[in-house]
Image (tube, rainbow, N blue to C red):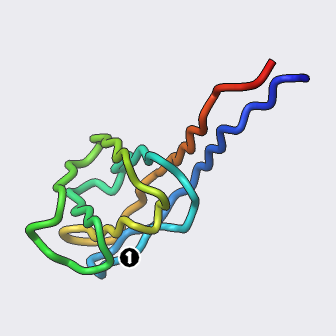
Amino acid sequence: MPFTNLNLCFSFNLVATTALKQLSSFECSEIYITNKTGQNIIIYDTNTADASRSFLLGNLENIVFKGITNSDQLSVLTTASAGTIYCRTAYYSNFSQTR
């Protein structure tokens, strides 16, 4: 039986603004986010701007969120004006196979 790699990865970018915006929906177990907005962004683990559930990410910084099931579980907003963030999702499945 040939090996089939079940890992699924998707890349996308998003124009973030001062309004809270949910990330695109991709099934994943982790997401890598790069901030290239020219300013700080705030990342929330829900679609609600709850400051107690947020991460501040500086310009040109990266972060990896693990243990999620879909990228749309995160939302972002910028601190001043619009800018682009870059995302890469990864879904890691069980590698065990029957031989």
Where, by quadrant of the figure, is residue 5 drawn?
top right
Mark 1 Cα within 10 Å, few/some/many (few <14, many 20+)? many
On-image quarter of the C terminus: top right
Residue at 57% of width from left, 58% of height from top?
A: 27
Q: In this view, does 9 lie above or below 46?
A: above
Image coordinates for residue 94, horizontal then vertical, percent: 60, 34
Residue 92 location in percent, x, y? Answer: 56, 38
- Specify whether 48 is left or right of 67: left
Horizontal side, residue 2 vs residue 71: left or right = right
Identify whether 99 is placed above or below 10.
Answer: above
Look at 17% across and 63% down and name the residue there: 54
Say what amino acid the circle numbered 1 marks. Answer: Lys
Extreme-front residue of the structure? 98
Is 28 rendered above or below residue 78?
Answer: above
Nearest the camera: 15 or 95? 95
- Helix, strand or loop for disc 1: strand
Q: Residue at x 64, y 28 (%)?
A: 95
- Left or right of residue 36, residue 57 in this image: left
Instruction: Name the image quarter holding the N terminus.
Output: top right
The residue at the point 25 percent across, 48 percent down is 59
- Residue 30: where, in percent of width, then height? 44, 46
Pointer 1: what residue? 21
